[in-house]
Image (cartoon, rainbow, N blue to C red):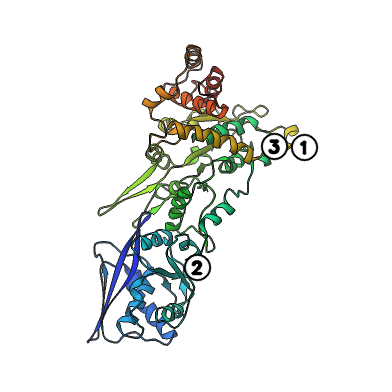
Amino acid sequence: MLVKTFGSAVQGVNAYTITVEVSVSAGMRYFLVGLPDNAIKEGEQRIELALKQCGYRMPRQKVVINMAPADIRKEGAAYDLTIAMGLLAASEQISPDKVSQYMIMGELSLDGSLCPIKGVLPIAIQARKEGFKGFILPVQNAQEAAIVNNLDVIGVRNILEAIEFLDGQRHIAPLQVDTRDLFQSHADQYAADFADVQGQENIKRALEIAAAGGHNVIMIGPPGAGKTMLAKRLPSILPPLSMHEALETTKIHSVAGKLGETASLLTTRPYRAPHHTISDVALVGGGSNPQPGEISLAHNGVLFLDELPEFKRTVLEVMRQPLEERRVTISRAKTTIDFPANFMLVASMNPCPCGYYNHPDKDCVCGPGVVQRYLNKVSGPLLDRIDLHVEVTPVTFDEMTATRKAEASTAVRERVVLARQRQSSRFEEFAHIHSNALMPPQMVKDVCRINEAGKALLKTAMERLGLSARAYDRILKVSRTIADLAGIEEIKIEHLAEAIQYRSLDREGWAG
């Protein structure tokens, strides 16, 4: 008897339906074909023992299992349940009527219980798209799949529940999740808030500008000045995720297996802070079975690189293209996969190896030329993609002990959202430009027009401070964002003046 069951293979952030054809006929051999990996081939032993635990048997006849299409490599143990249901239906131990109506995925334990799997959300989206009645999967993943409406999500704890459901012996109610209600009730619930930060008003202002225009930012300052603490609070002042952004971000985390058992929809912007020992592949993604890296996990959120000069130079250089294109392309011999990577880069660094260059109270003990060599670890092309350079100074005792409550993130976010709305209306004709930071150089001249007084100020600043040519566009973009925060259409001289001070590392002789 020939029976078809259906599973799914995830490539990138998209899923592709896999048809599992099971034939049981006269003979004694077991054949598994269709480009399966070792984990799937080893599934024969898991399936046999799991079925035995439930009182069912492995067919002792000629079994041929074909996983189509044959040109897509199938990987992982998530096909155990798909194959097991096909074997039972083909050997007439259960009714085959409902088997082909459902997408079936799950990894089996030897006792018949099911282990959670990765990539459930893109699989559920594809199952609905292809008209499946429902999706049978481990109960640990059911919340995640239930985000997709018009699809019966059947969460099962073990293989016996799946067998009895498909055989009509057990009723399992589909899990229902009100996605809109879930999204609204948990939106923007951040543990960290700007209200916790005493002092550092100039840094908060710089981060507000960065959030309003989607600008990348680097903070330079001594140890203990609050760089990491401020970076952690940046997601709390970014505009709330839209439903489309939330689903897009959740898909990436689902494919990477980063969602918890109880998690379903990500409602806050991601914040990723990889250690400086990270490898190139771990940062941008890749591997034999390409997985998203940290920059894709930070999609629609913040990527924080602490102690930037300590990262390997090759790791930093591979970020240059994703920072421009807002996506990562991973090429293999047989396939090319795109992962989205639209993130805000926030970096921090000490001004020198000892950390106290330019410190108001402590002396730097680094020798001549050491400071410049330390700064040169971060390449010019990478700094070229960072709009704001902010010098962080230590908080004074009076500021730390002040009783006045600092401004909360919600108040800052309201200003940021208004500024983003102005940018959205300005760029509504351009599909891939949503903020000032994304403007290409040819658009900067049209959007960021300045008067004669502004041109004179900018010329003087570039000559006196020794600003590089690459700083010119960055200053105009940042001044455009400052004007948007102020609700003013014209870039005024005070907006330019504030933007100029955020180019510390472009000044000739900054490091002596």
Tell which of 62 and 417 is nearer to you.
Answer: 417
Residue tagged by mark 2?
175
Q: Position of residue 433 (x, y in %)?
A: 41, 35
Vertical order, 258 against 78 (above or below): above
How far apart marks 2 and 3 lie (CA) works out to 43 Å
For mark 2, give the secondary structure: loop
Residue tagged by mark 3?
406
Residue at the limit of the structure toward the left, as seen here: 26
Residue tagged by mark 1?
403
Q: Position of residue 368 (x, y in %)?
A: 53, 25
Vertical order, 82 against 454 (above or below): below
Can you see residue 43?
Answer: yes
Amino acid type of the residue that numbered disc 1 sits on in the rendered structure:
Thr
Mark 2 surroundings within 10 Å by alpha-carbon count, few (fewer than 14), some (14 through 19), many (20 or more): some
Mark 1 surroundings within 10 Å by alpha-carbon count, few (fewer than 14), some (14 through 19), many (20 or more): few
- Position of 324 compared to 4: left or right? right
How far apart marks 3 and 1 lie (CA) works out to 9 Å
Tell which of 46 and 412 is nearer to you.
Answer: 412
Please state which of the two labelled residues, at mark 2 or mark 3, is closer to the viewer: 2
Mark 3 surroundings within 10 Å by alpha-carbon count, few (fewer than 14), some (14 through 19), many (20 or more): some
Amino acid type of the residue that numbered disc 3 sits on in the rendered structure:
Ala
